[in-house]
Amino acid sequence: MSDFAGMEELLRDFLLEAEELLGQVDNGLVELERRPDDRELLNDIFRGFHTIKGGAGFLNIDALVTLCHRTENLFDKLRNGELALSAELMDLILQATASVREMFGALAQGARPAPADDRLLAALDAALAGRPAVAEKSGPAASAAIGNLDWAALHAVLTGPPAGSATAGEEAPVQPPPHTAEAAAHGAHNDTRPMRPPPLPGQQKETTIRVDTQRLDLVLNLSGEIGLTKNRIANLKNHILHGRYDQETLKALDQAVNQLELLVSDLQNAVMKTRMQPIGRLFQKYPRLARDLARQLGKDVELVLAGEETELDKTMIEDLNDPLVHLVRNAVDHGVESPEERQAAGKPAKAVITLSACQVGDHVFIEIADDGRGMQPDTIRRKAVEKGLIDAETANAMDERQALQLIFLPGFSTKEEISSVSGRGVGMDVVKTNIGKLNGKIDVVSVPGQGTTFTIALPLTLAILPVLVVRLNDQSFAVPLSLVREIIPIRPGDLQRVSGRATLVVRDEVLPVRSLAGLIGWQARRPPAYGVLMQAAESTFVLAVDGFVGRDDVVIKPLADIKPRGIAGATLSGDGSIVLVLDMEELLGTAPAQTPEELLAMTT
């Protein structure tokens, strides 16, 4: 039973406000270290901490009140000039705010937090008494292969509560869906409610969202108009049921249906906007991260934020945290030099890392740029060959841009020694994988001696995805429209063999052909009739399919426990049939290329 029985709503409101205040306090402290004489900034920090302490006192959270009170007293002495701010004192204060955040974690579980560490409290008391004291720091803290899909369970996921999970670890190909009247009737309606997978054990997902009341008013107004239009359609339906088939009635019905389509589209857009949140709420976590890591490594680094008002889907903001942590840590550790190295190279001792965001069209671009040492393409090629990630011939054929992409390979690292921060070759491949799961792309540009810039391109929202729907063996599959360049016919005589692979020549460009049947392990019933010219990651290729349905905007539902490899999710078409959404990068990475003979032989 919760320690806050009957106070759950008060506790939730407190945590929502306190988490935001603490983030502002942390950022204010990092800024204060650069401007120690800024009294207004110090007053803002004091007020934020005082508000947290007041809320904790109202809820009788004694451990939090005790820690906040001691830390607040330090701010007061700094405010009054009784203490001078030093790097060591700032370390102590930031340890206190970290302990406050740990207490928030306990409160989020409905439990009263344990008292702060005695050593931390003693160090705060010593600092209040004017004695140098530093608290002791604590130590450093796959999906199944494409397998037999249970189509009944998949229908249950798409149309209601999830059914039991499929058997894990199956390696057999995806089996076609049952073509029965019962199966078709089971999914006869198109449920467009977005569905998110449950959080992993121990993983806390923020379940609340702040929405501008004007956006909610728009949703309410549209809902009212839809209700009126629905009544109009119901009235016209009754007229038709009673034999009124005159031109005027049919015209009125057509107009009402068109009006309903427009209103539903407007409502869908309005609801999507309620999910949009400023990315600054995520960015505010990183100045503290950069400051602490720079102190640990003996570097002088300033993290500059820009474009914090740029809005992005809330679920995407949550999933962006880990990739951005990797990139910020990477910039501090790998990217920028020590003050001595920078001065020897004629640079300012303080390095600058810029984290920025902006919206261009229907995409958001996030940049992490540093003014550090940059990357040497030749060094990257050599390291990749030494680690056996590529062969020397492939490395020599790469241009500089392609060589920089090698840093995203699993196991790649240029670090000679492994540390608690980096050097194990994990991180950048995870970043690319996680960005890919958000239907985004990441690119890198680097100039030796001047710095490196990582650019992430993301769709505004994951809730609705524009796709091209293709057909194979009477089953529909969807590919993200952002990957599609054009659709071309395929005639067996057009296929050519180049380096043992099936290829097509498209406007003097020789492109590999990948059969969708071969990628997912199906036996094709007929030779491919069409090719979808696609650009995925760094490769351009032709995806061979039976035919295509057309463009659509779909609501993707994750498959969670029954997700096979190469399938990003699923949706329902207008007739209630299942459409599998393909993860092209994952498919391309798991299936070998085919010869023309193999591609055509799959149909025999």
Image (cartoon, rainbow, N blue to C red):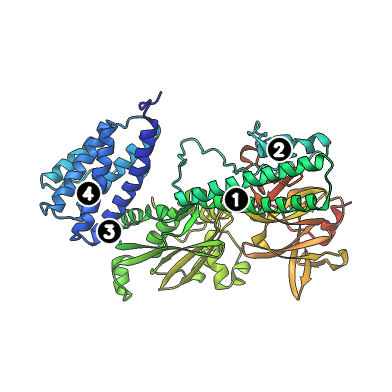
SS for dot 1: helix
Q: Amino acid at mark 1?
A: Gln
Q: Residues within 10 Å of mark 3 (few under 14, many from 20)?
A: some
Q: Nearer the N terminus, badge 4 or badge 3?
A: 3
- Res 309 quadrant in image: bottom left
Q: Nearer the N terminus, badge 2 or badge 4?
A: 4
Q: Nearer the N terminus, badge 1 or badge 2?
A: 2
Q: Which mark is residue 46?
A: 4
Q: Which residue is mark 2?
A: 155
Along the line of sight, the residue nearer the viewer: 96 or 188? 188
Q: Are marks 1 and 2 in contact (CB under 8 Å)?
A: no
- In the image: residue 222, left or right of residue 247: left
Q: Which mark is residue 31?
A: 3
Whether residue 183 is situated above or below residue 29 in the rendered picture? above
Q: Nearer the N terminus, badge 2 or badge 3?
A: 3
Give the CA separation, mark 1 to mark 2. Answer: 23 Å
Note whether residue 116 is visible: no
Q: Which residue is mark 1?
A: 268
Q: Amino acid at mark 2?
A: His
- In the image: residue 2, left or right of residue 133: right
Q: Position of residue 17 (x, y in %)?
A: 35, 43
SS for dot 3: helix
Residue at point 84%, 68% (across, down):
494
SS for dot 2: helix
Q: Nearer the N terminus, badge 4 or badge 1?
A: 4
SS for dot 4: helix
